[in-house]
Image (cartoon, helix red, strand yellow):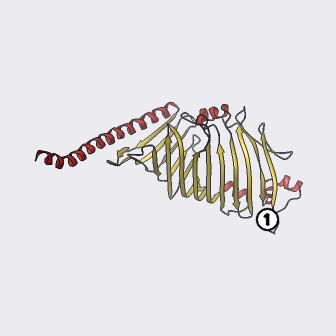
Amino acid sequence: MAASRKALLAPPLLLIALGVIWSGYWFVGSHVTGTAIANWMSRESESGRRWTCHGQNISGYPFRFELSCSSVTLEDARAPVTVTAGPLRAVALAYRPNHVIAELDGPAQAILPSGQKFTANWTQLRMSTQISGGRLAAYDSVLEGFRAAQVDASGEFQIAKAGSLETHLRQTPDVSPDAPSFDLAVDGKGVASALIDNLAGSNDPGDLTLRATLTRGDAIGPGNPIDIAERWRLSGGKITVAQLKIARGRIALDATGEFALDDEHRVAGRVEGTAAGFEQLLARGAGALGGLFNIRPSGGAPKGLPFAVTLRDGRVMLGPLRIATLAPLY
């Protein structure tokens, strides 16, 4: 009789024990999450960036860790710039704490020291980050219905928009973990900007496809952007563009390239490929150059013309012609 009573009590007692252990794990995990956030904010503050998660709350018991902020503020003393955005929600499953999915709501606003104000809004911004061995393993983001504008006394002036923009980052397979690289994929639909509108003479939205690899990912870590960029430069990091496609009205670009930072912290490298509608850009954006070659936009179907642009010693060269000068990034 005693043995049968023990057999009957064993399952519920086991469930209670598992519940107590799981609850302990969740509460310890939530404390660790809060401490990690506080420590990260402290390190950012030491680098001159002050992050504020207004109304911070950690919840999600028993199966998730959920962080929510009623709004987010970034004050960068080095830029200096102040950025505010709407509510933030970040979720990680309790059994997969290294995979975080976050959503950020608009609108966002940035104010520069000069008083210039920029605003941005979107219908959806969702991000996914996976950490493995203390390093970034994968990142994904989806941005939809994006609009950015500059605000002044006369009102708002739209400077950029995108129907959708997807970004995917993965560690390159079969690469030494001591010097990891990352494969980057970006796909944009309905992308437009005021600068390109003025240059191209149309406001047709365009599509963007980018496939690239960034080497020496081990140099990218904590710290301010300038320190990160310098570590990456000194380690010999480079960006190899396997595919860059831009389609916008009559203009179509298909190119490859390779870029790095030189000793003066300027972008250096080479990009080459074909460009359809290239004569339209030259005729509008560089009239003297277009006149030199007697280039005019044609009414027929656009034809792809080969081109090669070299960035070296702060100069942007189109063949033997110097078409621009590059300033140091930092």
Is 1 or 163 nearer to us in this picture?
1
Query: Label 1: few (<14), some or many (≥20) within 10 Å?
Result: some
Identify whether 66 is placed above or below 218.
below
Residue type, numbered disc 1: Pro
Image coordinates for residue 302, horizontal then vertical, percent: 79, 65
Q: Is residue 291 found left or right of 10 in the rendered image?
A: right
Let me know if residue 151 appears in the view: no
Residue drawn where x is 55% and y is 35% of the image: 221
| Disc 1 element | loop
Image coordinates for residue 67, horizontal then vertical, percent: 39, 46
Residue marked by disc 1: 302
Residue drawn where x is 57% and y is 55% of the image: 166
Is 44 or 296 nearer to us in this picture?
44
- The answer to which image quadrant residue 114 occupies is top right
Is 174 or 208 nearer to us in this picture?
174
Q: Is residue 209 found left or right of 111 in the rendered image?
A: right
Image coordinates for residue 263, horizontal then vertical, percent: 72, 31
Q: Is residue 275 found left or right of 158 in the rendered image?
A: right
Q: Is residue 53 found left or right of 190 in the rendered image?
A: left
- The answer to which image quadrant residue 189 occupies is bottom right
Residue drawn where x is 82% and y is 58% of the image: 305
- The answer to which image quadrant residue 182 occupies is top right
